[in-house]
Image (spheres, grey):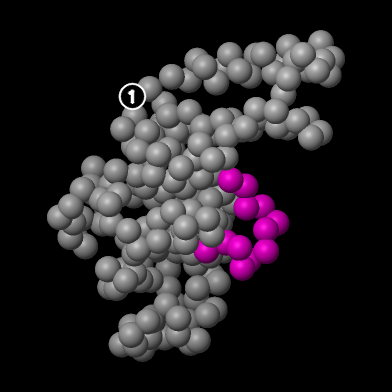
């Protein structure tokens, strides 16, 4: 696991509330843990640098309800890990509810809870184990209404390629810069340099 996760510690009072909630059918939905969930979300927003842990889109200043606390191993299948900070991150609703949901096909099955920290068992880039820049780059450029968004798997990273396809990141890619429309020469040169940088990542 990445350094820094271990600074998050539940208080004794929070542990009691979690223990009580865990006997319920859906412990994460218990009203008694609402404040704990918010503290987890705030922690992981900082830990993930205010980005969705899967598509890396900026979550800065987003309304809280559009940001989900993501259970990397779905709580439906791995209930004991419901409040385990190592199994949690933050994600946009698209990645959490539309793309990943309760699927398990991002795992090298069979998978046991004891393998929580076994990075090689995850086909996706694990936000708490893997350093995303080693697997996948996201390049964003915006000048007024013109935008470029590009995802580039790094080298031969199997996790980078798998994550790109699994979360259908091509849906986000756009390049509306058109040098033929000619903004001005310095901007065109900057765009050309960024395109060259993107192409060099592979």
Residue 12 or residue 19, whichever sits in front = 19
**On screen, residue 138 above or below 70:** above
Residue 114 among magenta residues:
no
Between 132 and 187, which is closer to the camera in this rendering? 187
Residue at 61%, 63% in the rendered image: 66
In the picture as drawn, the residue positioned furthest to the front comes out as: 180
Q: Is residue 44 above or below residue 15?
A: above
Image spot of residue 125 (x, y percent): 37, 43
What is the quadrant of residue 46 in the picture?
Answer: bottom right
Position in image of residue 97 (x %, y %): 47, 61
Q: Would residue 67 appear left or right of 88 to someone viewing this image?
A: right
> With respect to residue 180, does 39 lie above or below?
below
Does residue 98 show up?
yes
Q: Secondary structure at mark 1?
A: loop
Q: Which residues are magenta?
A: 57-68
The residue that label 1 is drawn on is: 156
Could you tell me which residue is drawn at 37 percent across and 33 percent down? 161
Query: Which residue is at 69% across, 18% downward?
Result: 191
């Amino acid at each position: 696991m990445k350094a820094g996760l271990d600074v998050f510690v539940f208080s004794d009072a929070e542990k009691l509330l979690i223990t009580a909630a865990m006997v319920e059918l859906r412990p994460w939905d218990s009203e008694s843990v609402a404040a704990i969930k918010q503290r987890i979300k705030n922690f992981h927003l900082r830990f993930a640098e205010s980005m969705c842990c899967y598509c890396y889109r900026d979550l800065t200043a987003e309304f809280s309800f559009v940001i989900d606390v993501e259970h990397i191993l779905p709580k439906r299948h791995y209930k004991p890990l419901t409040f385990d900070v190592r199994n949690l991150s933050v994600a946009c609703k698209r990645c959490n509810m539309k793309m990943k949901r309760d699927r398990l096909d991002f795992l090298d099955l069979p998978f046991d809870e004891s393998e929580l920290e076994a990075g090689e068992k995850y086909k996706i880039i694990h936000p708490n184990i893997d350093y995303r820049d080693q697997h996948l780059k996201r390049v964003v450029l915006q000048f007024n209404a013109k935008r470029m968004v590009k995802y580039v798997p790094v080298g031969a990273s199997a996790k980078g390629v798998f994550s790109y396809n699994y979360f259908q990141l091509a849906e986000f890619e756009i390049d509306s810069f058109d040098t033929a429309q000619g903004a001005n020469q310095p901007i065109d040169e900057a765009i050309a340099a960024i395109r060259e940088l993107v192409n060099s990542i592979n």
